[in-house]
Image (spheres, rainbow, N blue to C red):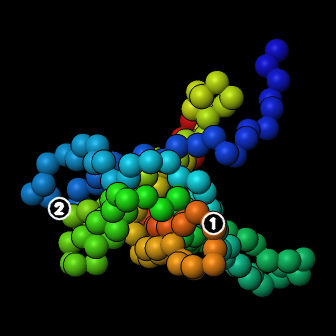
Amino acid sequence: MDTEYPLHVFNFEVEFVETNLLPEQGGGGAVPVCKGAFAECTGLEATMEPKVIKSGGANFGHAQRAGQVSFATVVLKRGMTSTRDLWKWFDMCTRGSAYAHRMSVSIRMRDAQGKPVVSWHLDKAMPVKFKAADLNAKGSDIGIEELHLAHEGLTLLS
């Protein structure tokens, strides 16, 4: 009998794959967007706004139906490095070629042996905010850069 143990949230990996949205472009392959690991990933959430249906004669509450789903902005944080991959992707999207450089993003949690056990998938992600590390001559902290991703769908893969 298998026992279910809680997963440790520190063991995860992020993979980017190009999503071509223009019909004249062929299928996309793996695109090396980021070199290095991320220290933090937040915003893996979806919210459904229920639709309330009021009907005459129903005096004990209203019917609830599924409404539109919205997705939170996913924030990836990593230690500042000399590579500029995240900035390059953000820069490409802000210079008018955003549709050509959308990414499918997979976030995989791994167990203690390193085997992927839970995978989240973001559809058609694009960077909407890049934040460089705060500079402070008095500080001794590691610089952290952030990449905020808007996306068009969140899926939990089996």
Residue 114, compared with residue 19, is above or below; it is above
The quarter in which the C terminus is drawn is top right
Q: Residue 22 has which mark? A: 2
Residue type highlighted by circle 1: Asp
Residue 52: x and y in percent read: 71, 78
**Quadrant of the image occupied by residue 86:** bottom left
Q: Residue furthest left?
A: 24
**Quadrant of the image occupied by residue 72:** bottom right
Q: Residue 141 has which mark? A: 1
N-terminal of the two: label 1 or label 2?
A: 2
The quarter in which the N terminus is drawn is top right
| Res. 20 visible in picture | yes
The Cα atoms of the two marked residues, 1 and 2, are separated by: 42 Å
* Number of on-image labels: 2
Q: Residue at x 34, y 68 (%)?
A: 87
Q: Residue at x 50, y 48 (%)?
A: 37
Q: Nearer the viewer, residue 105 or 155?
A: 105
**Quadrant of the image occupied by residue 60:** bottom right
